[in-house]
Amino acid sequence: MNTQIIEKMKTMKFYGMLRAFRTSLESGSMNQLTSDEMVAHLIDEEWDDRYNRKIARMMTNAKFRYKASFEQLYFESDRGMDKNLVLRLAECTFIDRNENILITGSTGIGKSYLASALGQQACTLGYRVIYMNSSKLFAKLKMAKADNSYISEIAKIERQQLVIIDDFGIQPLDAQGRAMLMEIIEDRHGKGSTIITSQVPVNKWYEVIGEQTIADAILDRLIHNAHRLELKGESLRKNLVNNIEN
């Protein structure tokens, strides 16, 4: 009977339930539980297993640059990282309110890591997240224009509850890039949250975007409900290399 039950669980892909059932058989705990307690235990294990697999799948699909955690963040006062603000953002209620986050600072200061930590936290809470490098994003969308997959790519971005655009402003946008960014931001305005990291201060983004009218439209939608983090100090990446060499 137990063998048949195990085979049926495998066939139905009840992996959490299967693992719990086997453990109960091996430990003898099944005899210590009432029928309803055993059913509740098996269902709880299956629920947890499916939830964990869902989160793992969302993490993979998001394609984060770093495997990041808040425990590894440096909150020294001279870095300009407001610990209370960051921890509030970690609750991810900003996503429910469709608010944005703009993270600026010099290279190696930890912008991408912080954005990745926020994104991964959002995934663990069940939000749909995607991480994209700015230059690669626009290159990919331009290729999508050529092979007629542009609409599906834009739709994929629009479906995400949180979009992370990393390293914005490395290169000025051309006319096609401006139009693409405008479409992304317009689609998300009031419907989803966006995190943007950049080495370029926000007041210089007009120059990065280019055409004044489009820049006004993009930045008006990005900035008016945005949390801003301006990171300061020396490059953490550089300090890490120096410590290793010493």
Image (cartoon, helix red, strand yellow):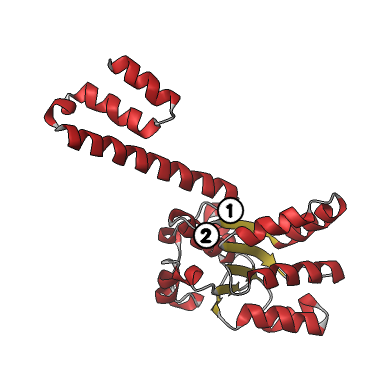
Between 37 and 220, the one nearer to me in the picture: 37
Which residue is farthest front?
36
In the figure, residue 189 lies in which quadrant?
bottom right
Count the marks. Answer: 2
Q: Is residue 83 left or right of residue 230?
A: left
Name the image quarter holding residue 41: top left
Instruction: Identify the residue shown where x is 56% and y is 53%.
Output: 66
Residue visible at 45% across and 63% down in the picture = 73
Disc 2 packing (10 Å; few <14; some 14–19; many ≥20): many
Q: Position of residue 42 (x, y in %)?
A: 28, 35
Residue plotted at (56% across, 81% down): 225
Distance between the alpha carbons at the discs numbered 2 and 1: 8 Å
Find residue 183 and report its horizontal and vertical position in percent. 74, 69
> The N terminus appears in which quarter of the rendering?
top left
Compared across the picture, whether 206 is left or right of 166 comes to right
The amino acid on which the numbered mark 2 sits, given as a three-letter code, is Gly
Compared across the picture, whether 100 is left or right of 17 comes to right
Residue 130 rendering spot, x and y as whole percentages: 60, 56
Q: Amino acid at mark 1?
A: Phe
Residue 120: give x, y in percent of width and height. Answer: 49, 56
Tell me the quarter of the picture where residue 45 sits.
Answer: top left
- The residue labelled by disc 1 is 64
Residue hosting label 2 = 119
Crowding at mark 1 (Cα within 10 Å: few <14, some 14-19, many 20+): many
Kindly identify which numbered label has been placed on residue 210: none
Q: Identify the element where label 2 is drawn.
A: helix
- The kind of secondary structure element at disc 1 is loop
Give the left or right position of residue 97, taking residue 22 as reference. right
Q: Residue furthest left?
A: 32
Viewer-proximal residue among 238 and 12: 12
Question: Which numbered disc, 2 or 1, marks the residue that appears first in the sequence?
Answer: 1
Q: Badges 2 and 1: C-beta atoms under 8 Å apart?
A: yes
